[in-house]
Image (tube, rainbow, N blue to C red):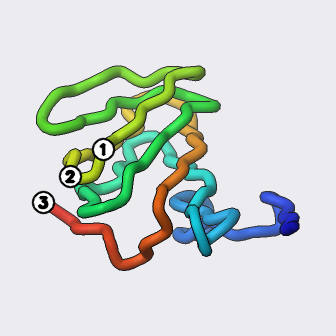
Amino acid sequence: MQRVKEQELKYRDGDSGVKYLFRGPHVDWGVILMLPGQSLGGHYHRRVEETFYVVQGSGTFTVNGQQYKATVGDVFRLEPEDRHDIVNDGDEPLKMVFIKYPFDPEDKVSIS
């Protein structure tokens, strides 16, 4: 059994970004906090599927060139190879829970 307290962990970029709550051995999961105007950055995964659950704010998901408005309660499950990006185009922070399975920290491919 493992236990963490989210508030004791840091976001990758200080006041925002990715915050892993658990990394492996079977799954990655955590939270992402994006301030207004921030973007996750276009990328895809070769073998990993990724799920996002919006818990605060709103934004726009772009998946394989299609745009989808994301609001609280929306869940997006992406297959491996789905090219995706998320932009906080709202007026408040966008917070999401993410899950990546299977655990493969070298699987991400950044795209422009």
What kind of residue is marked 1?
Answer: Glu
13 versus 99 height, above or below: below
What kind of residue is marked 2?
Answer: Glu
What percent of the width, then of the height, locates residue 53? Answer: 55, 34
Residue that mark 2 sits on: 81
Q: Secondary structure at mark 1?
A: loop
**Which tag is nearer the camera, tag 1 or tag 3?**
1
- Residue sitting nearer the eye, 1 or 8: 1
What percent of the width, then of the height, locates residue 43? Answer: 24, 58
Task: Determine contact: label 1, label 2, CB under 8 Å.
Answer: yes
Q: Residue at x 53, y 61 (%)?
A: 18
What percent of the width, then of the height, locates residue 87? Answer: 34, 40
Task: Determine contact: label 3, label 2, CB under 8 Å.
Answer: no
What kind of residue is marked 3?
Answer: Ser
Q: Earlier in the sequence, mark 1 or mark 3?
A: 1
Task: Determine contact: label 1, label 3, CB under 8 Å.
Answer: no
Q: Residue at x 62, y 31 (%)?
A: 56
For the N terminus, the quadrant is bottom right
- Residue sitting nearer the eye, 97 or 77: 77
For the C terminus, the quadrant is bottom left
Residue that mark 1 sits on: 79
Q: Residues within 10 Å of mark 3 (few under 14, many from 20)?
A: few
Residue that mark 3 sits on: 112
